[in-house]
Image (cartoon, rainbow, N blue to C red):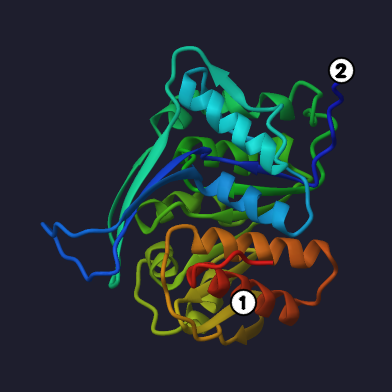
Amino acid sequence: MTVYMKQPDILCIGSVLWDIIGRSSSSMRAGSDVPGRITRIPGGVAMNIAMTLVNFGLTPAVLSAVGRDPEGDELVGEAARLGILTDHLYRSEDLPTDSYMAIEGANGLIAAIADAHSLEQAGTKILRPMENGTLGSDTAPWSGLVALDGNLTRDLLADIAQSPLFAASDLRVAPASPGKAERLLALVGHPSATLYVNLEEAGLLCQTTFQTAQDGAKVLTGRGVHRALVTDGGNPAAECLNGDLITAQPPEVLVTRVTGAGDTFMAAHIASEIQGMPRQAALERALNAAATYVSGETPS
């Protein structure tokens, strides 16, 4: 069989791993021991974004580190089955496939641990396809969309911010979690970087506390972020670009899961813009997709 390499619509750079999620319909606290369900599904910010983009009819490629262990082989196979391009993954003989573990109750996320050590240790190796001519080079950089994941190290994000490999890219950036939000400071001032953050993450980036998404988006762009989209759960979300602020109200839904909701919002917004939607419609569609996701359904 002849295998050809398809050109991706967007590069998703960051964590590609297994999500192990324990969910219970009970409210929990530290030390709780309750019945529920435990699932293992493909995850990681880059993978979550890629999976949602596929649902919107796009062809994403993932750039990440995945081990040559059984877990890695299974993960790559599942990603390819979903329609995600995996040809450009860095497959390491020495590094194990990363994983993420979370516990969710009726009262939200209780605790989570992200083991992305292999991605961090791989460093710039995951970017080789962007410099060896496969997807681009220093003299002919990738000129399309790039979804960047805050699981990348602070040093690697700083390198990306200055790298000629990304000089022509449309960067879309999401923190992996509030604990890693400050890593995105390296991209403040980048001429094309759009930051997708929640209200807490916006506050961490600005070393303050915001009451509304509108305030967070305005201050972020005032501090040098090219464009900022800020969500606040069921409260209005905001987008600010060149001083122009728009807002939208998320639909009210019953929340059954939270892990991956921000990634779904980001991917749906990117897909909406690729498909030519104006700003307000793209923001509203992304909020609807995230609401559908947290309700337990599949966004479309």
Please provide percent x and percent y for residue 32: 13, 60
Does 100 sit above or below residue 1? below
Instruction: From the viewer's perspective, tell me whether residue 109 is left or right of residue 76.
Output: left
Q: Secondary structure at mark 1?
A: helix
**Residue 293 or 64: which is nearer the viewer?**
293
Instruction: From the viewer's perspective, tell me whether residue 129 is left or right of residue 89.
Output: right
* C-alpha separation, residue under disc 2 versus residue under disc 1: 41 Å
Q: Which mark is residue 218?
A: none
Residue with the mark numbered 2: 1
Q: Amino acid at mark 1?
A: Asn
Does 122 sit above or below residue 243? above
Please provide percent x and percent y for residue 217: 54, 75
Please provide percent x and percent y for residue 192: 71, 56
| Residue shown at the point (42%, 55%) measured from the top left | 181
Residue with the mark numbered 1: 288
| Residue shown at the point (18%, 60%) measured from the top left | 34
Identify the image quadrant of the C terminus.
Answer: bottom right
Residue 242 visible here: no
Does 12 sit above or below residue 216? above
Q: Secondary structure at mark 2?
A: loop
Instruction: From the viewer's perspective, tell me whether residue 250 is left or right of residue 28.
Output: right
| Quarter residue 27 falls in | bottom left
Check the image and name the residue furthest to the left: 31
| Residue shown at the point (89%, 19%) measured from the top left | 2
Dot 2 crowding, Cα within 10 Å, few <14, some 14–19, many 20+: few
Q: Amino acid at mark 2?
A: Met
Q: How many numbered markers are drawn?
A: 2
Please provide percent x and percent y for residue 220: 53, 70
